[in-house]
Amino acid sequence: MALFAGKKGLILGVANDRSIAWAIAKEIMDQGGVCGFSHLPDKPDDEKQKNRRRVSKCTDGYENAKFLVPVDVQKDEDIAAFMQKGKEEFGEIDFLLHSIAFADRDDLAKDTIETSREGFKLAMEISAYSLLAVCNAAKPILSANASVLTMTYFGGERCVPGYNVMGVCKAALDAAMRYAAYDLGLSGVRVNAISAGP
């Protein structure tokens, strides 16, 4: 019997076919799981819908990829709409993958202490706070014993030269994961992080 047979869940963070999120989602679907996907919203003037197309190139042809909707994790209404779509399609979900991180390129290129205030807030909101926002929005549809997974990196535990502000964000993400694990663990939901290689 396939490992994920009968399991349903949501995937946040596939950008293209090289995304770690896609490798995870593909394995889940190959093991019988059913997934709903998000993509980064396209700009209103982007008639080619590049962001959607990059993800749909991955999901098209997979019977177990049930939907693809735009989600900006800086907008609570987008997160809520994604969860509502998951509820409409699946009722409850058994897993949720959060594989989202972002920092402005200019801030990433600077020494950590030179990170701009606005750049720091942006990186933290998208890379760390979004896990809490997503967990909170998903809580009503998480099944008993559901699992939430986020992606972290060694640069949040130790200084990795060149990782800069993203290392600070990953440290915050790790702490957010632990506290979310406590909050959701009271109802049997697990929250964990995988530290991927470079």
Image (cartoon, rainbow, N blue to C red):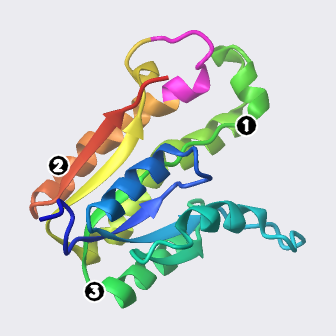
Residue type of the residue flagged with mark 2: Tyr
Residue 72 can be seen in this image: no
Q: Is residue 154 above or below residue 103?
A: above
Q: Main secondary structure of the magenta part?
A: loop
Q: Which residue carries the number 3 mark?
A: 91
Q: Which residue is mark 2?
A: 182
Q: Reply yes or no: does residue 160 show up in magenta.
A: yes
Say if mark 1 contacts mark 2, CB within 8 Å.
Answer: no
Q: Amino acid at mark 3?
A: Gly
User: Which mark is nearer the camera, 1 or 3?
Assistant: 3
As drawn, the label of residue 168 is none
Q: Nearer the N terminus, badge 1 or badge 2?
A: 1
Under circle 1, the secondary element is loop
Q: Residue at x 48, y 59 (%)?
A: 12
Element marked by disc 3: loop
Disc 3: CA contacts within 10 A as few (<14), some (14-19) or many (>=20): few
Q: Is residue 47 above or below residue 102?
A: below
User: Which residues make up the magenta segment?
Assistant: 159-168
Q: Is residue 116 shown left or right of residue 126? A: right
Q: Which residue is mark 1?
A: 104
